[in-house]
């Protein structure tokens, strides 16, 4: 591999079904030294007020999907858009085609920033937290994939959430692969059914493995969608 076109990055894809604790696991990896990238936050940035991404969305879907923001500039009405694409699957595909390339290029820029201060010979371990890692095909971009699993505890945990309706919960789950399939596809699994201490021990063990895998690791970065 031509090192001129590669970078000292070991890229991990972190996923898990809603309610299983992938963000908690991501926070644990972050405290150990991982460079975390929350793709939901990147997606928000891509359609921020005044952005080219927002203009593309509104040009296609119409100004009815705009709402006033606290800063005075019109922004995307995310709740209205989410409700629309859940009931119009063909428009969900259109929206993803509009935004995925922008999201991936933003992630690429973030990864390049992550390695800028690195001493010569070091490798940055970066983790993409992606709810639909396998469903979107982004696992192909990663050197290692991790699924956070919680088995039958998922629905009791979701029931305790009051920030979304039961309908939305079921709609989100309908788009996700089941846990068994995610476990089958993932390179590694974090079992988050037990105590926080148990999960931390698994993360620490996996981090030690990642440090070994990342040693002298170099890889290319994408220039378009997978």
Image (cartoon, rainbow, N blue to C red):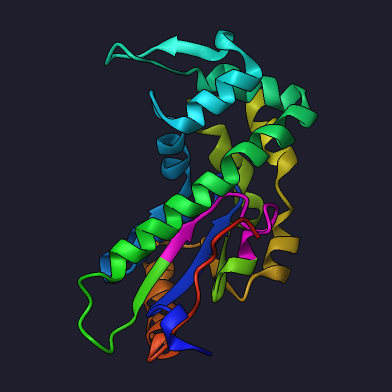
**60 on left or right of 215:** right
Residue at 50 percent of width and 47 percent of height: 103
**27 on left or right of 13:** left
Give the image location of residue 123, x and y in percent.
33, 81
Residue 81 visible in the picture = yes
Residue at 61 percent of width and 25 percent of height: 82
Magenta span: predominant SS is loop
Write down the quadrant of residue 124 in the picture. bottom left
Give the image location of residue 119, x and y in percent.
20, 82
Stretch in magenta: 127-139
Residue at 39 percent of width and 68 percent of height: 126
Is 132 part of what is drawn in magenta?
yes
Give the image location of residue 74, x and y in percent.
40, 13
| Vertical placement of residue 141 versus 3, above or below | above
Residue at 46 percent of width and 79 percent of height: 5
Write down the quadrant of residue 172 in the picture. top right
**203 on left or right of 145:** left
Residue 23 visible in the picture = no
Pick the quarter of the image with the C terminus: bottom right
Give the image location of residue 24, x and y in percent.
40, 54
Is 43 part of what is drawn in magenta?
no
| Vertical placement of residue 35 versus 212, above or below | above
**Towards the viewer: 212 or 28:** 212
| Vertical placement of residue 149 versus 208, above or below | above
Number of marks in the rendered image: 0
């Amino acid at each position: 591999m031509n090192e001129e076109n590669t970078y000292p990055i070991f890229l991990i894809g972190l996923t898990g079904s809603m309610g299983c604790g992938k963000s908690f696991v991501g926070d644990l990896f972050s405290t150990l030294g991982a460079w975390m990238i929350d793709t939901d936050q990147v997606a928000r940035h891509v359609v921020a007020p005044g952005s080219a991404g927002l203009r593309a969305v509104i040009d296609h879907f119409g100004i009815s999907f705009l709402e006033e923001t606290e800063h005075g500039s019109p922004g995307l009405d995310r709740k209205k858009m989410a409700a629309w694409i859940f009931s119009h699957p063909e428009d969900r595909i259109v929206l993803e085609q509009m935004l995925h390339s922008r999201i991936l290029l933003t992630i690429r820029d973030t990864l390049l920033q992550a390695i800028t201060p690195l001493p010569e010979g070091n490798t940055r371990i970066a983790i993409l937290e992606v709810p639909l890692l396998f469903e979107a095909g982004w696992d192909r971009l990663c050197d290692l994939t991790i699924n956070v699993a919680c088995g039958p505890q998922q629905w009791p945990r979701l029931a305790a959430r009051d920030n979304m309706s039961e309908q939305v919960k079921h709609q989100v789950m309908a788009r996700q692969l089941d846990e068994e399939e995610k476990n089958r596809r993932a390179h590694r699994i974090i079992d988050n059914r037990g105590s926080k201490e148990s999960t931390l021990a698994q993360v620490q063990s996996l981090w030690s493995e990642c440090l070994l895998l990342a040693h002298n690791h170099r890889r290319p970065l994408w220039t378009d969608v997978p």
